[in-house]
Image: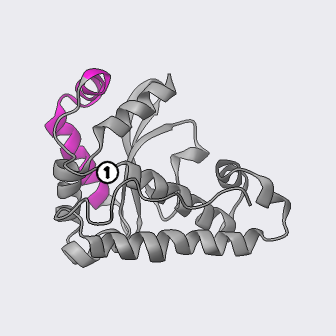
Amino acid sequence: MNFEVPPLPYAKDALAPAMSAETLEFHYEKHHKGYMTKLKTLLEGKAEANKSLEEVIRSSSGGVFNNAAQVWNHTFFWESMKPQGGGAPSGEVASLIQRDFGDLDAFKQQWVTAGLDRFGSGYVWLVLEGGKAKILSTANAETPLTTAAVPLLTTDLWEHAYYIDRRNDRAAFLKVFTEELLNWDFVAANLKKAG
């Protein structure tokens, strides 16, 4: 198998107080790495073990899909945050937000609403689809990688993403994500790659 869980892009305490080191420790070490351990067990001795993680996601179902997608989604989620994040985007990202959402406040409101409207576990995503930025939410391990949409940003909505810090208050977590964690540089890099 030619893929591993990459290291976090920052120290486990780098997002505090918006996200505690304890949350990152449990989420990354137990959940994220746990999905990879399970995936490797499921793929052991199978031809799919020689595919890239993205290929496995696009060609699998059931437990293999769930664990592969969770590995990829979590890696994308870590990159979607940064220490002293939030603030306002600039350049092409600012233009995109303005054009497709009206303004930054409208984007944030739609982001929080999409996250709160997702019943149960999943993710909220900023994607580029047909040249337009859209916010969507997916259930469980679902990911835009299985669609024509290009993922630009995500927030994990599973309870282990916020329960230690925020208990059952998903709204507070989504607000702190947009205000203090959101990595606009990552969005810009993904937008540039999208061409």
Residue 167 is situated, as x and y percent measured from the top left of the image, at: 22, 78
Q: Position of residue 148 (x, y in %)?
A: 57, 36
Considering only vertical position in the picture, is 13 above or below 41?
Answer: above
- Magenta segment: 91-116
Identified at 60% across, 46% down, the residue is: 146
Assign a secondary structure to mark 1.
loop
Residue sitting at 38 percent across and 76 percent down?
26
Give the answer, above or below, for where 108 lies relative to 11. above
Residue at image location 33% in from the left, 61% down from the top? 11
Instruction: Report which residue position mark 1 lands on.
Output: 81
Q: What's under tag 1, amino acid-wise? A: Met
For the residue pair 45 and 55, the one nearer the viewer reads as 45
Q: Position of residue 77 (x, y in %)?
A: 40, 54
Q: Quadrant of the N terminus?
A: bottom right
Color encoding of the figure: one colour
- Determine whether 106 is above or below 82 in the image: above
Task: Tell whether 119 sits left or right of 101.
Answer: right
